[in-house]
Image (cartoon, rainbow, N blue to C red):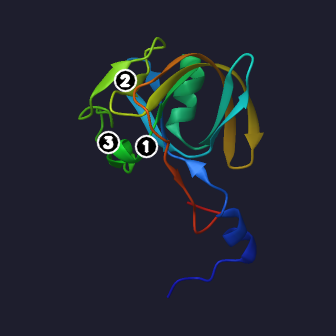
Amino acid sequence: MSEELSPLARALGRIPSGLFIVSTTNGDGPALGFLGSFLAQVGFEPPTICVAVGKDRAHLAAMRTAGSFAVSILDKESQGLMSSFFKAPPEGQSAFDDLETKSAPSGAPILTGSLAWLDCQITGEHDAGDHIVVFGTVTTGELLREGDSSTHLRKNGLGY
């Protein structure tokens, strides 16, 4: 039997979020990427975005080491690409291995089938409880086709 969600969890779950693949280089290892939904544009000049990354994720350490990250913005047409990021790839492999990608100027992989992409240089971070919010200045990007980015709503705004 499922547990009844609190009014707060249900209310928070109504905040829409996008669907993005956040990627970074990983030294000599395979590139890292994760399905991110806590991402927002927070400045115009310079163009700045932020993404929340779980404190316990290897992606955070790799992003800090690289000093950069890229974002592939998903739409209805490209949502199927996110399934590669639902579980950890086998040792020595990357979730990007079976996907069509190209390298952003930072070296991070971007999905060529996505709606758009952004490449970012990290400019700071902020502790946000169980996540670290990483801020990045957008250095380049491209809209790959016309369309609307995907959004989703959570049933539970207090967990995944």
Q: Residue furthest top?
A: 105
Residue 79 visible to an observer of this rendering: yes
Q: CA distance from mark 2 to mark 3?
A: 13 Å
Which residue does the numbered mark 3 point to in the structure image? 89
The residue at the point 51 percent across, 36 percent down is: 58
Q: Position of residue 24 (x, y in %)?
A: 47, 25
- Viewer-nearest of discs 2 and 1: 1
In which quadrant of the rendered view does residue 68 lie?
top right
Q: CA distance from mark 1 to mark 3?
A: 23 Å
- The mark nearer the N terminus, 2 or 3, is 2
| SS for dot 1 | loop
- Indicate left or right for 51 with 46 as reference: left
Q: Position of residue 151 (x, y in %)?
A: 53, 51
The percent position of residue 108, horizontal first and vertical second, equals 44, 21
The residue under the point 44% across, 23% down is 26
The amino acid beneath tag 3 is Pro
Residue found at x 49% / y 42%: 148
The mark found on residue 75 in the picture is 1
Front one among 89 and 71: 71
Relative to 80, is 97 above or below?
A: above
- What type is the residue that disc 1 sits on? Asp
User: Extreme front residue here?
Assistant: 146
On the image, numbered disc 2 is attached to which residue? Answer: 29
The 10 Å Cα crowd at callout 3, few under 14, some 14 to 19, many 20 or more, is: some
Q: Amino acid at mark 2?
A: Gly
Instruction: Estimate the spatial distance between the alpha carbons at disc 2 and disc 1, rounded to whole Å.
Output: 29 Å
